[in-house]
Amino acid sequence: MGAAADTAVPQVDLSTYGCPLHYVKARQALSRMAAGERVVFLFAAGESAEQVRDGLAADGHRVLSVEAVGDTLRVEVVKAE
């Protein structure tokens, strides 16, 4: 295994959860992480996924990227300090 495997960003698939549970699950996942760690959340695409992204940003977390992949929204986040 190379350095790329060592720096892989963990993914949390929340695409099966609806509003507001997917936001609650995302916050729970972030609460178990250290400040500055990165994580990718996978949400079912739609308005509620965008609200989760905005909510995480409002909580102080940094949203690095948002990418639509088929019916899934891939959101990469850095936990707030």
Image (cartoon, grey):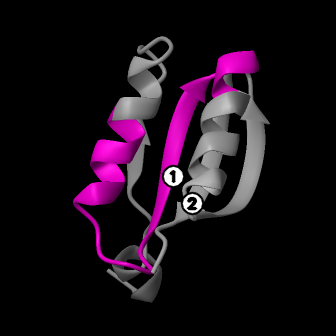
In the structure shown, which secondary structural element does the residue marked by tag 2 occupy?
A: strand
Does 29 sit above or below residue 35?
above
Q: Which mark is residue 77?
A: 2
**Percent position (x, y) of residue 39?**
46, 59
Q: Amino acid at mark 2?
A: Val
Viewer-proximal residue, 66 or 6? 66
Q: Residue 29 magenta-drawn? A: yes
Q: Residue 10 magenta-drawn? A: no
Q: Nearer the viewer, mark 2 or mark 1?
A: 2
Q: Earlier in the sequence, mark 2 or mark 1?
A: 1
Q: Which residues are magenta?
A: 25-49
Q: Amino acid at mark 1?
A: Val
Q: Which residue is mark 1?
A: 40
Characterize the local packing of mark 2: few (<14), some (14-19) or many (20 or more) Cα atoms within 10 angstroms: many
- What residue is drawn where x is 56% and y is 28%? 43
Does 80 sit above or below residue 25?
below
Q: Gap between marks 2 and 1, in whole Å?
A: 6 Å
Horizontally, residue 35 falls left or right of residue 31, namely: right
Q: Are marks 2 and 1 in contact (CB under 8 Å)?
A: yes
- What residue is drawn where x is 46% and y is 31%? 23
Horizontally, residue 28 falls left or right of residue 57, namely: left
